[in-house]
Image (cartoon, rainbow, N blue to C red):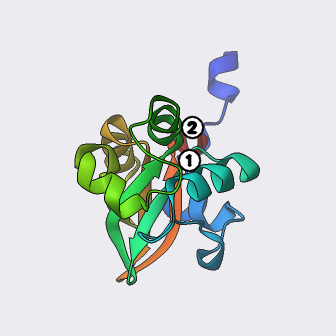
Amino acid sequence: MNDNDLERKEPERTIEQLVNDKPLKFQDILFATPDQTVGDIVAKMEKIGISQMPLVKDDDWEYGSVLLQILKPGLVDGTYGKDLPISEAMKKDEKNFRPFPTLPIGASRKDLEHKLFRDTAVLITQGTKVINILTAADQLELV
């Protein structure tokens, strides 16, 4: 018997296990709304130390998203004024405010990898309710 025979491989973690282990709960998911200004959203994100969050309108979690890497340079170069409502910024440049994709809690790790290849975050749903948000950093815990 060699050393490799003695090693046990742990079973692969699932998205559901990751969501259950993650301390974030639905009521804690931070989001922006269309009436908030670009300046307020950037200040909130910098204060909390986050780089992205969903943009939610009337409980529609697939309305859009905001990314600090888009908003901050837009403030500096004048593309977005600090008092501009984010909904107006979206009209100027829709492609930079695409909604995060969604996956059901029972989705596979491969599904999550595929979504995160294109997007910076994925909203995890249970039924019709968004229950969590996962990023590439979270995905590393599944490997």
Is 73 or 24 nearer to us in this picture?
73
- Residue 7 visible in the current orientation: yes
For residue 11, the mark is 1
Answer left or right for 38 relative to 50: left
Q: Which quadrant holds residue 29?
A: bottom right
**Above/below status of 128 relative to 66:** below
Q: Is residue 103 above or below residue 137?
A: below
Q: Quadrant of the N terminus?
A: top right
Label 1 residue SS: loop
Location of residue 136 with respect to 65 vertically, above or below: above
Instruction: From the viewer's perspective, tell me whether residue 45 is left or right of residue 62.
Output: right
Position above or below: 119 against 91: above
- Secondary structure at numbered mark 2: helix
Image position, residue 9 (x, y; %)? 60, 37
Q: Position of residue 129 (x, y in %)?
A: 42, 81
Left or right position of 23 against 74? right
Q: Nearer the viewer, residue 132 or 78?
A: 78
Q: Residue at x 56, y 47 (%)?
A: 11
**Who's the residue at 58% across and 39% down the image?**
137
Residue 105 pos. (x, y %): 43, 68
Q: Mark 1 and mark 2: span between their CA atoms?
A: 15 Å
Callout in the foreground (1, 2)? 2
In the image, what residue occupies the spot 73% across and 53% down?
48
Q: What amino acid is found at the position of numbered circle 1 in the picture?
A: Pro
Residue 103, by quadrant, is bottom left
